[in-house]
């Protein structure tokens, strides 16, 4: 013990010396661990400074974290059924997961992006894309619930999505996999020329956020990997990285890695918008679902759309250009002032940075280096602003701070590299644990980044926590980037495989967060807004139970006259009008999930009893000291029984 | 006498603020309610801190069998008090005016104050009696029945003034802006009397 103490003592002394001897170097190094603990410590009862909305990857959802604590607050169900709340199981939310392929219980969520006003995050909505069955969702940041999902037709592998323009005019969705448009039964070998890559511009209603596909740009059959809007001087343009410009349809890991340079496609969406507003483009038949959740009725509805407007880029001269960019670029990131477009060439040793003014100049002078399917190609040298030489291996994504620095993740060398815009020199590099994919700086893809924290989200699941068997969650690292050198200050686990995250100052969102729904505003067609309104109604084999909850009973809590073979709809309204008094509902033998009903809300679950008997239902959410008493019984009689419907609450016990 | 009469008018007119501001505040504090829960007592009824507070207080109170908080129509006081206060304010202003034109002497100011004090004490007595009834007249089928150390039913009566721990809540009662202005007003009428007295000598 004494030896150990002595050992620690010596270490402390050594640390003090090393700190002192490093006066002109990194001063904070010596006191690193204690300082860093303070930096991420958010005392009980205090709030984090930032919200981070972290993509839930193949969970299909979106998770909400606090920074700098790294604490997870909530998982918002988006593209996947979520038994915790009944999302995707309740009658009201099943339509949210409807698509042209029918009901889909799962999604692969990717890139969250917060709505912007004048190039700055405004905290109204957050958008996120589903990669597998192409969709874009909008989540309302007053309720933190998914309120709208639109399917993207003619698209496959919805990956270069869902990024918003400077005033949220559009949320943009690009296809990673090109497909025949319209779909047809042809040989896969007919890829070249026949397959198209759709870039979809989805307009967003400035008042209510409602989404509508304004147009789809039918690009050559490349893979459109990532994208970002221009901002400031480049507002009105959108940039997409491409790979597989070889147009290979098999063994892409080899065949799509042959070209020395692929492209960044620069799209002048303002020009195309004008063309469309003047009647340009043509409507083509396309089936896609548009699902909207109404917070007054608490009901989602799915509408199948029949057509979409498509634009052939060669019909709008001067709207689309290709910028040669080395080696299958992945991330496509635009600097806060909109001057630079960074192409993260994932197989290149150098990072390529294009200049927007130089691009405009080259276009002006019509200095083209050929074309691809009629789309002019600019010359690499003409648009190049600079290159970050030998920065690392496998660059994927870049974000920016407010001091003229960029931060790029390197997957293969497992590090984040900080470099300077304009001079292209590397300033600092810090390892990640391990194999980083995305990184996020609050506002890091807007005009006004907040250069205080940066977090890196890793791609492989090996982490530095207690082991939990072969399958692990992912891990992220939080860095303090307020100084010249980045400092690792926290490891925290993330859920699913996060593909990007969006972070925002808490005070832009927290004050708007709703506490409960007003019962008076509840327009659900099956709501019972008081116990007097509760009833049980039979309609053939369907039985509708209008049930209410309030601490701590259901009304009614005794129901008779249900028969085997009935389809029983429990429409449950939570009459509470106070923050944090949800009630749950579950009935034995339910073939779906429970319901978790917020105050003032109505939710519906279907129960199809298969056995005669008296079956209990109960509240699943510990609601009060009398929660354990919050239960009821429902009697199920044989199919040919003539027992009449009957319901009651609190009849005197005999 | 002019100054005394002016003070009398101002003092009694301050009673009218009770038609705008609440008389009293009752606050319930518990860790689960970081935003607070409570109500304002107006001359003509109760008002929650938020539109839901009265319902939520009733919801909590049902466990211990307390009566629901009264609606304006449930208590005669909520109809009578505004009339009494209106009349007293009018009377005070009238006495002030009459004093100004030397129709009555400063002694009327004191007379008004004594009447107002009697009415005020009666009002407080009535309010306290309601609090006692509200806190002790409980539903015999109450879900939770609490007894004190002597084995008698626990009283949930909120304090008239000050704070008291009631189970997991601390109830705090204190005058609201209307109540404060009422007190200031009554004090001013006493000042009016003193000024009148001094000038008369």
Image: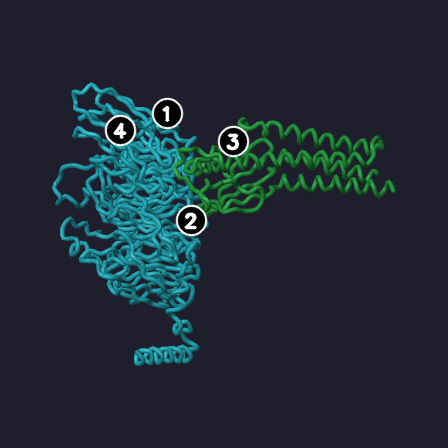
Label ID, residue B70: 3
Q: Which residue is mark 1?
A: A533
The quadrant in which the N terminus of chain A is found is: bottom left
Which dot, 4 or 1, sits closer to the camera? 1
Q: How many marks?
A: 4
- Which chain is drawn using cyan? A
The answer to whether residue A383 is visible is: no
The answer to whether residue A27 is visible is: yes
Between the C-alphas of marks 1 and 2, the distance is 44 Å
Q: Residue B101, relative to residue A328: is it above or below?
A: above
Q: Are marks 1 and 2 on the same chain?
A: yes
Q: Earlier along the polypeptide chain: callout 1 or callout 2? A: 2
Q: Which one is nearer the viewer's eye here, A428 or A355?
A: A428
Q: Which residue is mark 4?
A: A569
Structural crowding at the residue carrying mark 3, measured as other residues with C-alpha within 10 Å and reported as few (<14), some (14–19) or many (≥20): few
Residue located at (52% from left, 29% from top): B71
């Amino acid at each position: 013990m004494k030896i150990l103490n002595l050992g620690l003592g010596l270490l402390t002394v050594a640390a003090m010396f090393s700190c002192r001897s490093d006066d002109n170097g990194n001063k904070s190094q010596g006191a690193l661990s204690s300082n860093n603990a303070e930096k991420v410590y958010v005392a009980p009862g205090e709030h984090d400074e930032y919200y981070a909305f972290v993509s839930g990857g193949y969970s299909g959802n979106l998770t909400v974290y606090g920074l700098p604590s790294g604490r997870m607050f909530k998982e918002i169900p988006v593209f996947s059924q979520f038994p915790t709340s009944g999302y995707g199981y309740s009658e009201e939310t099943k339509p949210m997961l409807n698509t042209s392929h029918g009901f889909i219980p799962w999604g692969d969520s990717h890139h969250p992006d917060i709505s912007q006003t004048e190039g700055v995050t405004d905290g109204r909505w957050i958008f996120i894309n589903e990669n597998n069955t192409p969709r874009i969702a909008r989540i309302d940041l007053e309720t933190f619930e998914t309120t709208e999902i639109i399917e993207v037709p003619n698209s496959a592998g919805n990956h270069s999505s869902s990024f918003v323009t400077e005033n949220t005019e559009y949320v943009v969705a690009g296809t990673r996999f090109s497909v025949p448009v319209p779909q047809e039964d042809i040989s896969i070998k007919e890829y070249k020329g026949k397959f198209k890559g759709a870039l979809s511009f989805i307009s967003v209603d400035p008042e209510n956020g409602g989404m509508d596909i304004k147009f789809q740009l039918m690009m050559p059959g490349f893979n459109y990997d990532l994208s970002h809007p221009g901002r400031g001087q480049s507002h009105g343009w959108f940039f997409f990285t491409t790979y597989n410009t070889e147009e290979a349809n098999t063994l892409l890991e080899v065949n799509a890695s042959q070209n020395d340079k692929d492209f960044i496609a620069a799209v002048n969406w303002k020009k195309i918008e004008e063309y469309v507003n003047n009647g340009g483009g043509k409507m083509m038949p396309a089936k896609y679902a548009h699902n909207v959740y109404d917070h007054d009725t608490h009901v989602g509805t799915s509408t199948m759309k029949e057509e979409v407007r498509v634009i052939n880029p060669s019909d709008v001269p001067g709207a689309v250009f290709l910028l040669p960019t080395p080696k299958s670029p992945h991330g496509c990131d635009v600097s806060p002032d909109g001057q630079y477009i960074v192409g993260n060439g994932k197989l290149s040793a150098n990072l390529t940075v294009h200049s927007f003014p130089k691009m405009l100049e080259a276009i002006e002078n019509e200095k083209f280096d050929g074309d691809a399917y009629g789309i002019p190609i600019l010359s690499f040298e003409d648009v190049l602003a600079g290159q970050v030489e030998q920065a690392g291996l496998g660059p994927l994504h870049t974000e920016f701070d407010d001091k003229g620095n960029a931060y790029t993740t390197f997957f293969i060398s497992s590090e984040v590299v900080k470099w300077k815009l304009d001079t292209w020199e590397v300033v600092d590099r810090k390892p990640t644990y391990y194999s980083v994919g995305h990184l996020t700086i609050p506002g890091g893809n807007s005009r006004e980044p907040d250069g205080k924290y940066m977090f890196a989200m890793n791609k492989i699941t090996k982490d530095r926590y207690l082991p939990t068997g072969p399958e692990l969650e992912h891990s992220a690292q939080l860095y303090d980037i307020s100084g010249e050198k980045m400092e690792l200050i926290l490891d925290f686990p993330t859920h699913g495989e996060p593909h990007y995250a969006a972070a925002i100052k808490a005070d832009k969102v927290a004050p708007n967060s709703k506490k409960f729904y007003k019962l008076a505003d509840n327009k659900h067609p099956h709501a019972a807004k008081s116990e007097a309104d509760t009833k049980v109604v039979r309609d053939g084999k369907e039985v509708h139970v209008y049930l209410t909850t309030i601490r701590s009973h259901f009304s009614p809590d005794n129901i008779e006259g249900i028969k085997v073979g009935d389809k029983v709809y429990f429409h449950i309204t939570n009459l509470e009008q106070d923050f944090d008094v949800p009630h749950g509902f579950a009935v034995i033998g339910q073939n779906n999930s429970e319901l978790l009903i917020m105050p003032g809300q109505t939710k519906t679950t279907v129960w199809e009893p298969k056995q005669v008997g008296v079956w209990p239902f109960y509240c699943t959410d510990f609601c009060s000291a009398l929660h354990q008493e919050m239960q009821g019984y429902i009697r199920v009689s044989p199919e040919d029984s003539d027992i009449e419907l009957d319901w009651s609450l609190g009849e005197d016990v005999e | 006498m002019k100054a005394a009469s002016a003070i009398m008018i101002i003092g009694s007119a301050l009673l009218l603020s009770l038609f705008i501001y609440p008389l009293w505040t009752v606050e319930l504090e518990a860790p689960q309610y970081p935003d607070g829960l409570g109500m304002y007592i107006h001359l003509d009824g109760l008002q929650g801190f938020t539109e839901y507070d009265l319902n939520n207080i009733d919801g909590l109170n049902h466990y211990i069998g307390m009566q629901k908080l009264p609606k304006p129509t449930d208590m005669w006081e909520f109809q009578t008090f505004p009339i009494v206060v209106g009349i007293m304010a009018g009377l005070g202003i009238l006495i002030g005016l009459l004093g100004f034109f030397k129709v009555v002497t400063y002694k009327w100011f004191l007379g008004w104050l004594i009447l107002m004090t009697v009415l005020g004490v009666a009002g407080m007595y009535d309010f306290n009696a309601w609090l006692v009834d509200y806190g002790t007249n409980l539903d015999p089928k109450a879900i939770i029945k609490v007894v004190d150390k002597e084995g008698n039913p626990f009283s949930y009566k909120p304090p008239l003034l000050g704070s008291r721990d009631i189970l997991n809540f601390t109830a705090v009662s204190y005058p609201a802006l209307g109540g404060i202005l009422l007190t200031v007003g009554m004090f001013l009428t006493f000042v009016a009397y003193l000024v009148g007295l001094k000038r008369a000598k």
